[in-house]
Image: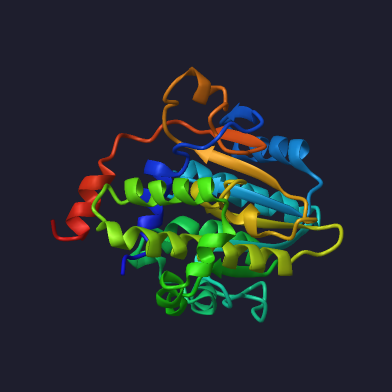
């Protein structure tokens, strides 16, 4: 079984690979002030009952934007809940006071991301902004205890159209740097689908009239054609932001033409090159 950090590699290496043509999103670049950028995004995207914000897990500019979105939505009394990929479904801060300590919040969310790709120090400002505003933080990810059952659940394969399922399998294979044995690709893809399904259920259950649920997850999870949106109720309106911190591969991608179904593509300064496959090989003892 692989750890949470693999979500980082999958999202960075293969999150958008091979997607079919989609309506071209609006492409925006980072402003110097994250608050200014968050305000501009909300002006463009609101109102919506559900706002899905993708990220590269290792891009601090993305977490800074998320914090601003939390603070600005909360200040308007429009934020009904913050749903996180980084914590398991069933965990929440609902019973905590707004003055709760970080230790109390970590315990309530059973935060284990420090052993994976989601260190608390990275996400604490986002989480605590919601807690301080009295907004519940909800874990959305598939519980680790349910992963083995998901791996063998062939019915999950039928939740995606055939072409989307194949692209998800390609993303899993490439995201694991072609190190996964072929028989493991289908089971690992089912875990990805089950994760998206769990996040969709959590977000949908948190919807409140006149307010917005903010869901934060890796870019691969917010894709309209194979991520969380596939599993949402058909009548649940939602908007999608994809945040990227890497150079565009070509002019089409720079214009947002190859990115799957986002309403806005938010580009922050590219991160320094990093060999994620080398990281993965080391973690696997290869």
Front position in the image: 80 or 165: 165
Q: Is residue 226 above or below residue 207?
A: above
Residue extending furthest left?
286
Image quadrant of residue 89?
Answer: bottom right
Q: Is residue 227 above or below residue 107?
A: above
Front position in the image: 118 or 48: 48
The percent position of residue 166, horizontal first and vertical second, equals 45, 48
The percent position of residue 33, horizontal first and vertical second, equals 60, 35
Evaluate whether residue 58 shows in this view: no
Front position in the image: 187 or 55: 187
**Residue visible at 42% across and 73% down in the picture:** 152
Q: Is residue 151 above or below residue 258?
A: below
Residue extending furthest right?
210
**Residue visible at 74% across and 60% down in the picture:** 233
Front position in the image: 61 or 152: 152
Q: Please give the count of numbered marks on the rendered protein.
A: 0
**Residue visible at 73% across and 49% down in the picture:** 238
**Residue visible at 25% across and 46% down in the picture:** 277
The percent position of residue 251, horizontal first and vertical second, equals 49, 18
- Image quadrant holding the N terminus, namely bottom left
- Image quadrant holding the C terminus, namely bottom left
Left or right of 99? Residue 57 is left
């Amino acid at each position: 079984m692989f750890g949470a950090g693999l979500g980082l590699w999958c999202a960075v290496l293969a999150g958008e690979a091979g997607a079919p043509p989609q309506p071209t999103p609006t492409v925006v670049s980072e402003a110097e002030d994250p608050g200014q950028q968050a305000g501009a995004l909300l002006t463009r995207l609101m109102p919506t009952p559900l706002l899905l914000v993708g990220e590269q897990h290792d891009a601090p500019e993305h977490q800074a934007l998320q914090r601003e979105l939390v603070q600005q939505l909360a200040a308007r009394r429009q934020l009904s809940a913050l749903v996180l990929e980084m914590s398991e479904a069933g965990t929440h801060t609902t019973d905590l006071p707004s003055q709760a300590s970080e230790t109390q919040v970590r315990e309530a969310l059973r935060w284990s991301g420090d052993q994976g790709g989601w260190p608390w120090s990275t996400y604490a400002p986002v989480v605590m902004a919601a807690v301080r505003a009295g907004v519940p933080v909800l874990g959305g990810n598939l519980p680790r205890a349910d992963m083995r059952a998901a791996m063998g659940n062939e019915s999950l394969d039928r939740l995606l159209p055939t072409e989307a399922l194949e692209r998800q399998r390609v993303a899993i294979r490439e995201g694991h740097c072609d190190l996964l044995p072929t028989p493991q690709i289908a089971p690992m893809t089912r875990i990805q689908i089950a994760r998206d399904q769990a996040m969709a259920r959590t977000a949908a259950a948190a919807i409140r009239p006149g307010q917005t649920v903010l869901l934060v997850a890796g870019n691969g999870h917010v894709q309209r054609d194979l991520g969380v949106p596939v599993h949402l109720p058909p009548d649940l309106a939602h908007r999608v932001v994809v945040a990227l911190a890497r150079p565009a591969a070509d002019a089409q991608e720079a214009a947002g033409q190859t990115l799957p179904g986002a309403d806005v593509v938010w580009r922050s300064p590219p991160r320094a090159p990093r060999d994620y496959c080398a990281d993965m090989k080391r973690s696997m003892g290869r």
